[in-house]
Amino acid sequence: MDTFSLLAQGFAVALTPTTLALAVAGCIIGTMVGALPGLGPSNGVAILIPLAFSLGLDATEALILMTSVYYGAMYGGRISSILLNIPGDEPALMTTLDGYPMAKAGRASDALVLSGVASFVGAMLATIGLMFLAPMLARVAYLFGPSEYFALYLLAFSTLGGIASDNQRKAALAACIGLGIAMIGLDNSTGMGRFTGGNLHLMDGVDFLVAIVGLFAVSEVFIFIESHGRSSAIGVKLDAITVPVKDIVRSFGTMLRASLVGFVAGILPGAGASLGSFLAYMGEKAWVRDNSQFGHGDPRGVAAPEAGNNAAAGGALVPMLTLGVPGSGTTAVLLALLMTLNITPGPLLFTERPEVVWGLMAALLIANIVLLILNVPMVRIFVKVLSVPPWILLPGVCMVSFVGIYSLSGSYFDLVLMIVFGLLGYFLRKLNVPTVPIILGILLGNHMEDSLRRAMVISGGDWKYLFQSGIAIGFWVAAITGFIAPVFLRRFLKKPQAHTT
Amino acid sequence: MLIMLITGGLRPTDTWQDDALSHVMVPRPCLITNHLERDLKQNHLTRLAGAVVLGLGLSGTAQAAECIAPANPGGGWDFTCRSISKIMYDIKAVDEPIQVTNMAGGGGGLAYTHVVTERADDAELIVAASSATATRLAQNAFGGMTSDQVRFLGAIGADPGVIVVAKDAPYQSLNDLLDAVKADPSKVAFAGGSAVGGFDHLKVLMALGRAGFDDITKVKYIGVDGGADAITQTIGGFTQAMTGDISEVVGFLKSGDVRVLASFTDERLPGEFSDIPTAKEQGIDVVAVNWRGLYVPKDISDEDYNKWADALTAVAESDDWAEQMTANGLAPFTRIGSDFQGYVDGVIEEIRTLSKEIGVIQ
């Protein structure tokens, strides 16, 4: 049977009134979960697992509900990023960079609609890629060993300094702070604790969600109190919802490129949506000729990470379904759900359980269309939540943050840590040090280190091993020519200028 | 409370933290808290806590128990949690579905630390354990944690250890592989789901020891996040062999992507795995099975402990479990309650001796 007849079969499974209702409910819940800081897609999916059980849903229905929430959260994360400058979840981190400046410039609704369309494009392309290429793409995971992963993370890391266009040194400093924080906790390679000061809570390391909520949401509260609300991010006015046709057309190429980058990042187990949106943004910034507006509200800077993270969300389903290796946090929860339903993902899933796989594909397509409808014409409904007066909104955001973080480990320690991060964020913002690279440093640090150490074990400490595959070399070349060399060249080129003045 | 907390946070004294704590700590909820996957690699997983708390709000379900699988989905611990939890509920040994949470990291050390430090009196918690748990406790690899900080509940099956290579690998038998290591240890790298010095690693070292290779520090082993990951690396050719348990390789074995060189069991495995030779019949006298079981927090009452022991016994005797064991190549291995605690203590002692012998610990 070819793909289309299989898909038709999938639609027969997925297109019943019950499943459609579940898809709509899942999309709404997902969008809300994504928009609330401290609750990300993995929480959203995990939250609904007990619900799926108590409703007695069958495998396909449960999957449709969960994937709708998953895709919904990917859409929803951008809402608070754009309106509040607080990422709703970690993949929406990059959307704050240009989304919030756009909102500040009075173009909040343009940013929301544009990012909604970008999300749709990314998710749609990824779903199509998943349908036609999944079994083949599973092989990509076999091409990535420790040295390839290390080069990939290095590429991502080397771009960190460029995040803030105005002060690269401060961005690099922030990235190093993040990298330092990533070192805290149990060392995967030896089972020993590092930098924990004997504190067992720190044995688990610092959860980046604690860092995100602290650095963004809690520090926002401090700034708000200090300035009596004047210089706070909160309180952006939402103008009338229009469709920014010009921006959409102009950034369509961006969306396509970002979707490709995001999809590939999603396919690689361990990289996930955050890396997808990050690479999509940085890649786009490097690609376009005139990137001076990036970081100041460039519509392409909104489209790229949103297309990237939604494409990565679809891409992450590839290794999950075909290898049983989750490519992101949320797919790990979905994998868990599948196994509870007695479906074992692996190389044979596509042939052994086609009704599940194709029902899922059909559900993804349906969810996507529902989400586009929810997120473009009806974006105002979600935004209402955020357009309440700051004196109500802020304590609300704060409360959700506390509940969300407490729920991570059920430990007050994470709350204290979150407040510490809030204070750190407050001072760093006063010093004009960007906080986004800190989060990325934490996210990338562990992966990068583990990959490097595994590579060194395999090669017996031979550094040349890091450059022995085409893929790794490609990443190294991209990192050096694209991001590392320009930093030094710029300094080199600037000096003569200094003399002439 | 929130406002007090915020203003407290801004007070220029060093007492704010105490204020904050007094407000935040008081209501230690009896709800299931949760856990989570800290290992960033796979990640930021399962925020079940939030899940359960909000799940309650959404669905009105009563409080559910939790089973922590100290590894990512797809591995052996994950299988233990999922099968046992499901069967317990299906046969009505428990009233509510049991939540399964994945908490990968440190070869199970993160979950162990979590249970000891945060959940010591949580009667609604069971945690998947195996020979790997005992191994790491024996080697003091859980950051000073000891085996008497939890109560071992029981084991209801054993997962035979296997050595697996990619389908196109040149090694046709276990001895081919071991000979290759003996000839040049730098040419053969092993991948496994446990950290360096863990049970997957030890199996390889034991086999090499029996084959007459003593220079064990030369053996290359990388610990990745779970068996599925280890197989991916082996199929990709980054490592030459994967050491793990049969349940971790079933999917890839059926698809023909990998070949099993040996199982570390006394007898050949039953059913579809019966054509896999044992290490013993290839002259390598190593028996390494990974028992599948559970531990519970230390400070729960004997009544709660016995309740779980009874539920686990019911699972062991169920037809569902017998089916699961057959499907996943598990051999029967039932020890529950104080009998099991005694067994684990013995095993830990034995591994400690062995680890010293092979030089993993002093």
Image (cartoon, coloured by chain):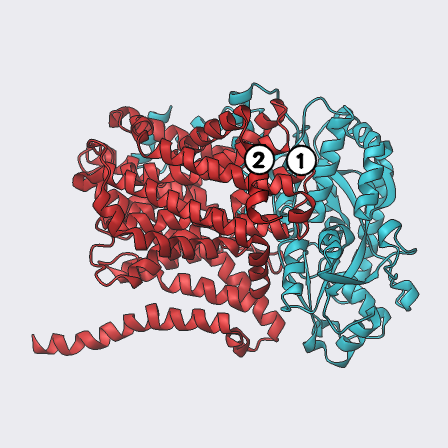
Chain colours: A red, B cyan
Residue at x-position 35% and y-position 60% = A283
Is residue A104 in view from this perspective?
A: yes
SS type, badge 2:
helix
> Residue placed at 61% from the left, 20% from the top?
B62
Which chain letter goes with mark 2?
A: A
Q: Nearer the viewer, residue A267 or A253?
A: A253
Residue, disc 2:
A63
* Circle 2: residue type: Leu
Marks 2 and 1: CB-CB under 8 Å?
A: yes
Q: Find the distance from the CA under tag 2 to the CA under tag 1.
A: 9 Å
Q: Which residue is mark 1?
A: A341
Residue at the (39%, 69%) spot, across then down = A479
Give the residue at the far left of this rendering.
A501
- Above-or-below relation of A316 to A337: below
* Tag count: 2
In this rendered view, identify the residue nearer to me: B237 or B187: B237
